[in-house]
Amino acid sequence: MSNPVPPRRPDPRPRRRDRHGRGMRGPIAPPQVPLAMSRADVFDDLVRDSADRLERQWPQLSGVEFVVQEVPPAAPGGGWVDGWLDGPDSVPLGRYAAARDGRPDRIVVYRRPIELRARTRDDRALLVHEVVVEQVAELLGLAPESIDPRYGQD
C-alpha cells in the first residue's frame, strides 16, 4: 500500500507577480494626486470653494446648504419643475429653494449642464462661481454685482 499524497497547501507568501511576470497592478496615481479625483469630486470642490469665498464676505450664508446635483429634475408634463426656465429650450444651471419644514435655505448647482457649457477647467470654475453668485443674489434679494463685484467679467 502506498502513502497517500498530502493535499497541496496554498503558498503562505504573498504573490509578487502575476502569471505573466509583470508584477501586481496597483492604482495609476496615489490618492493625493489630482488625477485620482473624479470629475464630480472636482466639481464639488469648485462649488465648495465658491461658497466658502462668499461666506467670508456674507456671514449670513453660514446656514445655507450648498448642494450639487447631476441634472435638474423634469416635470411629468415636460419642461422643468417649479417653472424656473428662461425660455422653452433653456436648462437651469442652478436654483435657490427657500427654507421650509425645518430645512435650511438651499442652493442647488447642476453639474452636467454646466460641464456641457464650459470648455476648459477655468471656464468651468468661472461658470460655477457665477451660478453660485446668481443664486446667492436671489437668496439675499440683491444684484449679483453687489454680491461679487467681479461678476460678469472675464
Image: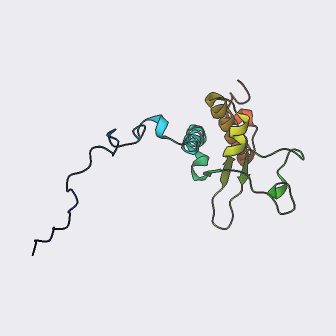
Residue 112: x and y, percent? 69, 44
**Camera-side residue of 44 and 119:** 119
Relative to 83, residue 117 above or below? above
Residue 65: x and y, percent? 60, 53
Residue 28: x and y, percent? 43, 38
Q: Which quarter of the rendering shows the C terminus? A: top right
* Residue at figure coordinates x 23%, y 60% from the top left: 10
**Camera-side residue of 24 and 129:** 24
* Residue at figure coordinates x 86%, y 57% from the top left: 78
Relative to 144, residue 138 above or below? below
Q: Is residue 29 left or right of residue 129?
A: left
**Camera-side residue of 49 and 9:** 9
Quarter holding residue 118: top right
Q: Is residue 87 left or right of residue 28?
A: right
**Camera-side residue of 126 and 105:** 126
Q: Which quarter of the rendering shows the N terminus? A: bottom left
Relative to 72, residue 2 above or below? below
Q: Residue furthest front?
A: 1
* Residue at figure coordinates x 84%, y 44% from the top left: 90
